[in-house]
Image (cartoon, grey):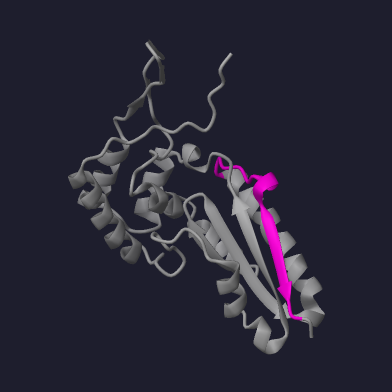
């Protein structure tokens, strides 16, 4: 028996579709105020970037980088919840909101293997693979994580299903930072669970770096 997991619909796009979505991504990233925490064209921050930013080599500090991973993240985005958050949290309304509603609604999906095809189902959740808008819409869907992570004294960076958290401290109080990280991860996992998302503990990593001084 064949089992299919983590298969998202593949969006069939034209050059005009890509250009339109790219334009909207540029406008909405700035409009929603997420530009400083979201990097649409770079899906990672290197460990060297993080540790240099924390200036550990200059001050003899301890720094940590937490790499969070979500299970089937894009599949779990509820379209109605996303549309509600676009309006209430980011003030996207009227024509712009109707455009997003049109973009998300009326989509159907089926699976085909050879000459065998499954029944067609309507999609009420999930972002399409290959879409330009998908990663940014997912970040807007999970934007509450930014303030949640910052409430623990840590700094977030979000891109699609990947969330990175970093922080630094004096080496002598690294236990305090460790406690901050544990509390933050626990709260993030609880928030994800309440929003139909699941933190993948097997792929979540914590990297520590200190100087030899």
Please state which of residues 188 and 162 is positioned toward the viewer in this rendering: 162
Which residue is found at the position 78% from the left and 80% from the top? Answer: 171
Q: Is 8 rendered above or below residue 64?
A: above
Q: Tell me where residue 52 appears, x and y as whole percent.
A: 59, 79
Q: Bounds of the magenta span?
A: 195-211
Q: Tell me where residue 83 appears, x and y as whole percent.
A: 36, 45
Q: Tell me where residue 78 appears, x and y as whole percent.
A: 45, 39
Number of callouts in the render? 0
Q: Residue furthest bottom?
A: 58
Asked whether the viewer can see residue 57, the reply is yes
Which residue is found at the position 43% from the left and 70% from the top? Answer: 36
Please state which of residues 109 and 99 is positioned toward the viewer in this rendering: 109
* Residue 202 falls within the magenta-colored stretch: yes
Q: Quadrant of the N terminus?
A: top right
Which residue is found at the position 39% from the left and 59% from the top? Answer: 40
For this view, does 173 lie left or right of residue 118?
right
* Residue 87 falls within the magenta-colored stretch: no
Which residue is found at the position 25% from the left and 39% from the top? Answer: 13
Q: Quadrant of the C terminus?
A: bottom right
For this view, does 98 lie left or right of residue 119?
left
For this view, does 171 lie left or right of residue 154?
right
Question: Quadrant of the rendered structure where residue 209 is?
Answer: bottom right
Q: Is 124 rendered above or below residue 162?
A: above
Asked whether the viewer can see residue 153, the reply is no
Please state which of residues 57 and 81 is positioned toward the viewer in this rendering: 57
Q: Residue furthest left?
A: 16
Q: Residue furthest top?
A: 115
Q: Tell me where residue 187 appears, x and y as whole percent.
A: 66, 55
Question: Quadrant of the rendered structure where residue 116 is?
Answer: top left
């Amino acid at each position: 028996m064949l089992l299919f997991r983590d298969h998202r619909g593949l969006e069939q796009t034209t050059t005009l579709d890509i250009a339109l979505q790219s334009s909207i991504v540029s406008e909405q990233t700035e409009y929603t105020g997420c530009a400083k925490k979201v990097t649409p064209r770079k899906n990672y921050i290197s460990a060297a970037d993080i540790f240099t930013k924390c200036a550990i080599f200059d001050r003899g500090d301890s720094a940590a980088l937490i790499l969070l991973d979500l299970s089937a993240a894009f599949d779990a985005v509820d379209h109605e919840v996303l549309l509600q958050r676009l309006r209430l949290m980011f003030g996207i309304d009227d024509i712009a909101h109707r455009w997003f509603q049109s973009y998300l609604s009326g989509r159907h999906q089926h699976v085909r293997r050879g000459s065998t095809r499954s029944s067609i189902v309507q999609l009420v959740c999930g972002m399409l693979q290959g879409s330009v808008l998908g990663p940014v819409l997912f970040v807007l869907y999970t934007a509450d994580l930014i303030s949640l992570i910052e409430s623990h004294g840590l700094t977030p960076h979000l891109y699609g299903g990947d969330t990175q958290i970093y922080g630094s401290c004096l080496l002598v109080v690294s236990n305090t930072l460790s406690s901050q990280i544990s509390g933050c991860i626990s709260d993030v996992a609880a928030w994800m669970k309440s929003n139909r998302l699941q933190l993948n503990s097997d792929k979540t990593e914590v990297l520590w770096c200190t100087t030899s001084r």
